[in-house]
Image (cartoon, rainbow, N blue to C red):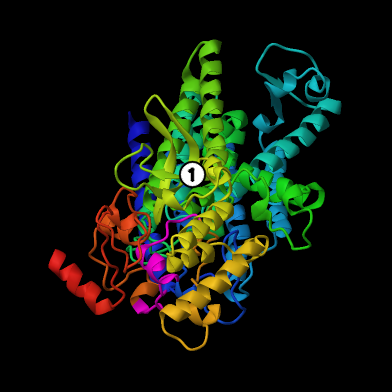
């Protein structure tokens, strides 16, 4: 009972210390902000020196603050619980590894702040690999448990003789000299290096949205705290040390999360209030990931780590497979017959890749999912993986453990396959069934099927063009056929053009990036004609050029690859009315802190509606020009571009 009391006290102390240290770090280092720009899949690059990224980035102080809380609480735990020499050695190895990973990330953050470019991928990987191997070597030479090979590795048919001097049914095998001694040393270095580096980098990949990595680490650390309780006994004095490390990891993240709570805010839609005040940066992500890896290695649960942290595995694996394997291979070896007769450069967004962007959370962010709900959903997914991992570790029967592993694999496969499901779009009618009213054309993503009343698709937007613009049987057959977003936007623009909704057509075509638009030369000629017709409607004596029609818009400043307007989000009513996107206002002092003065008191639902992620069943998502009149059409609400009109409207609603 006293042990439980001390563990609870240490958990609370570490959480409070992390909360306080994060607040102090924010006050002392408010300008320690990243200046690195990372061009993403669907964003234009910024000209060097034209804008200051630090105006919208948050201080990178969460990582050192929570690491300091973990180290101080860990040392306090050693004194309160009267650790023995081997226990102190194990604790200091774990804390030292955490500090080592943090230093690698801190160097990367420092480079981003003062050199505007972080460490190269090779340098960062080399740093975490060095820390992992160094800790593995110290663990082998300083502790007796490090010189014990264990199942399932010692029972492998090919390398068993290299890891154990004699065959035994016991779960462990002590190695003292000879080939097994050095064989286990090399194997432990490889195991520690791979587990430590991959886990820390996967957590780093997950740190792309406010609160995302923190919540996932909390559920994984808490799961390991439950798992490790099974090895707390006098025969295994290291069990209590691992319990302390797991609880401190979870507590530190819990104290950090109030400073990095998720919200619907995005740089490209800054109407929602940003709740986060700081971010952990690479220093915090690498430290937490490395600490989880050390807990798994010291407790000999490396395989279970990949199940408890399956969310991190999906994030890291998506980046590795798509960015480092598939894209380079397709660039060298893939020939797209559709573009075989053109010399125009084919961007990788035309390749048959599994995701719109990586890591995995960027894919759903580009689809326009509300960021707050996206993070909450990821937390729930991480909690499910954690619970399944706990179940696998505590159930007594082998078939129950295998069932848990199969469920983890099925759940991970469903999340992975959702990329290909949601990556493809199709054009259909709204509503689907024939009615007296003219059905309009709409954009969907997913599969054009309904199974047992469950829609396998999601409606993105409804256009002003009706099905009357379909002229040929081939175009009619083209409805409900899956395609990429660029072809879908091109076709919707063509249908709006036929219906004489020229601004709506221009808005559709302008959502296609320039590199992808060059592969569709028909759009260029239609754009010229639309510009001429719009000039005539404005009673201009000379046709207006397209660059005169498009209002100059300052780029969104952020290092998140998904923080630029992208072709996957719904087109707003004002864009369909005038053919151009909304003006992105310059950031003032309040917006630099993530708060808009006119929208601070808005509810999250209201903010989510304004920032382009509203419920698509609302009339505002039906894209009709302002001068469009149709007695059968749903009523649209005009979008006020004046800040004064927005203020008056907001005051009237309250």
Residue shown at 37% from the left, 79% from the top? 588
Residue 578 in the magenta stretch? The answer is: yes
* x and y, in percent, of residue 581 in the image: 44, 70
352 w.r.t. 169: above or below: below
Identify the main secondary structure in magenta: loop
Residue 102 in the magenta stretch? The answer is: no
* x and y, in percent, of residue 331 in the image: 77, 52
What's drawn in magenta, residue-wise? 568-589
* x and y, in percent, of residue 633 in the image: 28, 54
Residue shown at 27% from the left, 60% from the top? 636
* x and y, in percent, of residue 301 in the image: 59, 29
* Residue at the extreme right: 179
Q: Is residue 118 left or right of residue 623?
A: right
* Quadrant containing the N terminus in the rendered view: top left
Callout 1: SS: strand
Q: Which residue is mark 1?
A: 445
């Amino acid at each position: 009972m006293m042990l439980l009391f001390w563990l609870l006290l240490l958990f609370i102390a570490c959480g409070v210390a992390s909360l306080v240290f994060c607040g102090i770090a924010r006050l002392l280092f408010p300008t320690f902000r990243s200046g690195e720009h990372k061009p993403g899949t669907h964003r234009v690059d910024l000209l060097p020196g034209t804008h200051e990224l630090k105006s919208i980035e948050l201080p990178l102080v969460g990582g050192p603050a929570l690491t300091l809380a973990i180290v101080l609480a860990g040392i306090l735990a050693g004194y309160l619980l009267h650790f023995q020499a081997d226990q102190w050695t194990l604790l200091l190895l774990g804390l030292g590894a955490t500090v080592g990973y943090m230093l690698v990330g801190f160097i990367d953050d420092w480079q981003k702040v003062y050199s505007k470019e972080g460490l190269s991928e090779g340098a960062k990987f080399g740093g975490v690999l060095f820390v992992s191997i160094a800790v593995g070597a110290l663990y082998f030479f300083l502790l007796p448990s490090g010189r014990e090979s264990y199942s399932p590795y010692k029972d492998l048919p090919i390398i068993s003789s290299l890891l154990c001097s004699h065959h035994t049914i016991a779960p462990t095998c002590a190695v003292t000299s000879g080939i097994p001694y050095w064989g286990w040393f090399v194997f432990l270095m490889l195991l520690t290096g791979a587990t430590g580096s991959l886990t820390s980098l996967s957590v780093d990949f997950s740190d792309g949205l406010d609160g995302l990595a923190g919540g996932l680490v909390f559920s994984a650390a808490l799961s390991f705290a439950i798992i490790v309780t099974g090895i707390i006994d006098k025969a295994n004095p290291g069990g209590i040390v691992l319990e302390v490390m797991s609880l401190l990891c979870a507590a530190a993240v819990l104290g950090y999360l109030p400073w990095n709570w998720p919200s619907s805010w995005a740089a490209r839609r800054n109407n929602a209030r940003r709740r986060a005040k700081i971010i952990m940066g690479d220093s915090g992500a690498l430290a937490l990931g490395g600490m989880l890896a050390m807990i798994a290695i010291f407790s000999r649960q490396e395989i279970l780590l990949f199940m408890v942290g399956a969310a991190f595995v999906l994030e890291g694996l998506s980046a590795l497979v798509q960015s480092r394997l598939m894209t380079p291979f397709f660039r060298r070896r893939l020939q797209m017959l559709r573009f075989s007769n053109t010399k125009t450069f084919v961007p990788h967004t035309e390749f048959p890749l599994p995701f719109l962007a990586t890591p995995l959370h960027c894919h759903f962010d580009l689809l326009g999912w509300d960021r707050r709900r996206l993070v909450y959903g990821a937390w729930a997914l991480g909690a499910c993986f954690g619970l399944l991992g706990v179940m696998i570790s505590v159930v007594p029967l082998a078939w129950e453990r295998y069932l848990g592993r199969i469920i983890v694999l099925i759940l991970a496969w469903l999340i992975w396959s959702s990329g290909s499901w949601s990556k493809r779009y199709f054009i259909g009618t709204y509503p689907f069934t024939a009615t007296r009213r003219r059905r309009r054309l709409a954009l969907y993503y997913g599969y054009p099927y309904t199974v047992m009343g469950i829609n396998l698709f999601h409606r993105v937007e409804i256009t002003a063009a009706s099905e009357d613009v379909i002229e040929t049987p081939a175009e009619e057959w083209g409805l409900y056929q899956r395609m990429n977003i660029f072809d879908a936007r091109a076709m919707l623009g063509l249908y709006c053009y036929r219906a004489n909704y020229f601004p709506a057509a221009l808005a559709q075509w302008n959502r296609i990036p320039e590199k992808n638009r060059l592969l569709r030369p028909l759009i260029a000629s239609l754009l010229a004609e639309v510009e001429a017709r719009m000039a005539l409607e404005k009673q201009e004596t000379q046709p207006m050029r397209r660059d005169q029609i498009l209002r100059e818009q300052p780029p969104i400043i952020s290092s998140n690859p998904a923080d630029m307007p992208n072709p996957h989000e719904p087109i707003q009513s004002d864009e369909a009315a005038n053919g151009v996107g909304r003006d992105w206002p310059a950031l003032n002092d309040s917006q630099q802190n993530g708060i808009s003065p006119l929208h601070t008191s808005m509810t999250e639902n209201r903010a989510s509606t304004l920032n382009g992620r509203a419920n698509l069943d609302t009339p505002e998502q039906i894209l009709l020009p302002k001068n469009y009149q149709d007695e059968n059409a749903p009523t649209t609400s005009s979008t006020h571009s004046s800040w004064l009109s927005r203020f008056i409207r907001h005051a009237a609603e309250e």
